[in-house]
Amino acid sequence: MADLNPIAKRIHQISPEPVELTLNDGTTAVFRITGAEFFQQEFQAEGVREDDDADYRFVSSADNESILVGRKGVDESEWTMVGTVAKVNRRGS
């Protein structure tokens, strides 16, 4: 069995405490993650960003190499891919 994605493991370990995520485009924001779970190696979580009313979803890529980030605004009916998680920190670290 292959290892769990290290970024997903870190998100899972920190949540439900606030977690600071840096996306592949350099954007850094604080998220409150809920429902973080693994199904074998696949990761899925939902959360909200401190400065945004939208919902966010975090899922493993098909090859389990990346954690994809989707966003759905309050007036939107579909999820939009906003990037991948490049770095995870405990808030304030």
Image (cartoon, helix red, strand yellow):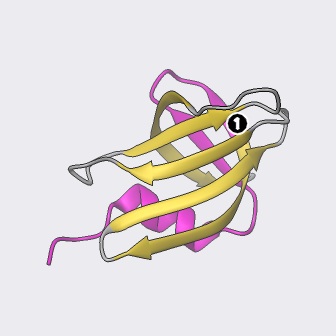
Quadrant of the rendered image containing residue 21 = top right
The magenta segment? 1-29
Q: Is residue 40 left or right of residue 34?
A: left
Residue 20 vs residue 81, the one in the foreground: 81
**Left or right of 52 on screen, residue 44:** left
Query: Magenta stretch: residue 23 in it?
Result: yes
Quarter of the image where the N terminus is located: bottom left
> Which quarter of the figure has residue 35?
bottom right
Tell me if 21 is positioned left or right of 87 in this view.
right
Q: Residue furthest left?
A: 1
Label 1 residue SS:
strand
**Count of number-bearing discs:** 1
Q: Work out whether residue 93 can be spotted.
A: no
Residue pictured at 57% horizontal, 60% vertical: 45
Across and down, in percent, residue 64 comes to 26, 54
For the point 45% across and 28% down, the residue is 24
* Residue 9 sits in quarter: bottom left
Assess disc 1: are there few (<14), some (14-19) or many (≥20) residues with their C-alpha within 10 Å of its C-alpha: some
Residue 24 lies in the magenta stretch:
yes
Amino acid type at circle 1 is Ala
**Residue at 82% across / 33% down in the picture?**
74
Please state if 6 lies on the left or on the right of 15 as rendered: left
Q: Is residue 46 visible?
A: yes
Q: Position of residue 39 (x, y in %)?
A: 38, 75
**Residue named by callout 1:** 29
Residue 78 appears at what percent x and percent y?
61, 32
- Taking the spot 49% from the left edge, 61% from the top edge, the residue there is 44
Residue 31 x %, y %? 72, 48
Q: Residue furthest front?
A: 77
